[in-house]
Image (cartoon, grey):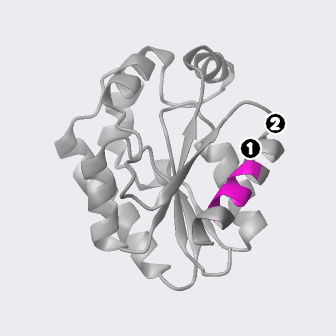
Amino acid sequence: MSTPHVVVVMGVAGTGKTTIGPLLAAELGVPYAEGDDFHPAANIAKMSAGTPLDDSDRWPWLDAIGQWAHGRAGLGGVVSSSALKRVYRDRLRAEAPGAVFLHLTGDRALIEERMAERKGHFMPTALLDSQFATLQPLQEDEAGVSVDVSGTPEEITQRAVAALRRLES
């Protein structure tokens, strides 16, 4: 990518945001921020208990991610955030208008299988249905691309880089 954008790696739980985000950042030569690190402890406790977050839980989290992205404007960066609803992405764009979204998509069975294999993550597979029910894919007027998560992390990252480059041309 020629312009140092902030790329928000988005998607439902288990699509590989935490795996692909750092690989993408390394490929682009920019810093990576883990979106989960912006959650307050109350959000993590709620999700760990199998309770989906509501919007009042998400606003401070999204604002913190947006502030990080704003601070990287013109410098570039990669940050993960589920950003499942358009209104969430709009909130992030309000803080960081140049943000570009990379939507990691995939087959539900594959995503559930990958979630089940994760060790030590607070998000239980029981919340996957609520994630898919909440998901509003990127719309045509949103700066971003979708990339399928089948394959190795390296293959997914290379597809993401290629898609982001096409977006700029």
Which residue is located at x 27 percent, y 46 percent? Answer: 58
Q: What residue type is labelled 1?
A: Ile
Q: Mark 1 points at which residue?
A: 156
Reply yes or no: does residue 160 show up in magenta.
yes
* Left or right: 53 as drawn, with respect to 32: left
Which residue is located at x 55 percent, y 74 percent? Answer: 5
Which residue is located at x 58 percent, y 64 percent? Answer: 167
- Magenta range: 159-164
* Quadrant occupied by the C terminus: bottom right
Q: Position of residue 166 (x, y in %)?
A: 65, 63
Q: Callout 1: few (<14), some (14-19), or many (20+) C-alpha neighbours within 10 Å?
A: many
Reply yes or no: does residue 37 show up in magenta.
no
For the stretch drawn in magenta, the main secondary structure is helix
Helix, strand or loop for disc 2: loop
> Mark 1–mark 2 contact, CB under 8 Å?
yes
* Quadrant occupied by the N terminus: bottom right
Which residue is located at x 67 percent, y 80 percent? Answer: 2
Q: Where is residue 113 in the image (x, y as percent from the top left)?
A: 65, 16
Q: Position of residue 57 (x, y in %)?
A: 23, 43
Toward the viewer: 114 or 143? 143
Q: Mark 2 points at which residue?
A: 152
